[in-house]
Image (cartoon, rainbow, N blue to C red):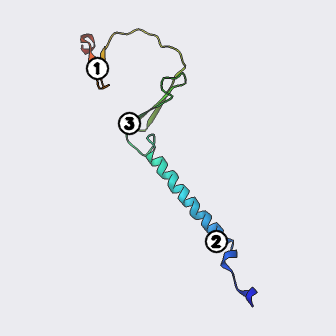
Amino acid sequence: MRFLDSDEADDPILSVVNLVDLFLVIIGILLTVIAVNPLSPFSNNDVVVIENPGKADMKVTVKQGEKLTRYESNGEIGEGQGTKAGETYQMEDGSLIYVPSQEAVK
């Protein structure tokens, strides 16, 4: 009477249970990726993300609190009028020092 014995290897519901476990693991990984992302809505940090720096299609995304602002380059050189705000010097170690001019301090 072997044909009356149930074989657990032939049970199709076990495959569905394994798929549910797999999807739970994938959901956990995706939630971790969202939490670690610097532009995550769950973080309170102010972040600046620069995509393709120095190229014609450069994009800058600024996150301040809950506000996201995206700036896109159109490849043109900017023009305008302004005043000199100061000078920047590069030190031997590569760091930059900004010295405001006397006109900018006023």
Pointer 3 residue: 46
C-alpha distance separating marks 1 and 3: 22 Å
Pointer 1 residue: 98
Q: Quadrant of the N terminus?
A: bottom right
At horizontal 50% and vertical 56% (from top left) the residue drawn is 28
Q: Which of marks 2 and 1 is nearer the N terminus?
A: 2
Q: What residue type is labelled 1?
A: Tyr
**Position above or below: 15 against 79:** below
Left or right, 28 with reference to 47: right
Q: Position of residue 42 (x, y in %)?
A: 43, 46
C-alpha distance separating marks 3 and 2: 47 Å
Q: Do the residues labelled 3 and 2 touch (CB within 8 Å)?
A: no
Q: Position of residue 54 (x, y in %)?
A: 48, 23
Q: Position of residue 86 (x, y in %)?
A: 29, 14
Farthest residue to the bottom: give it.
1
Q: Quadrant of the C terminus?
A: top left
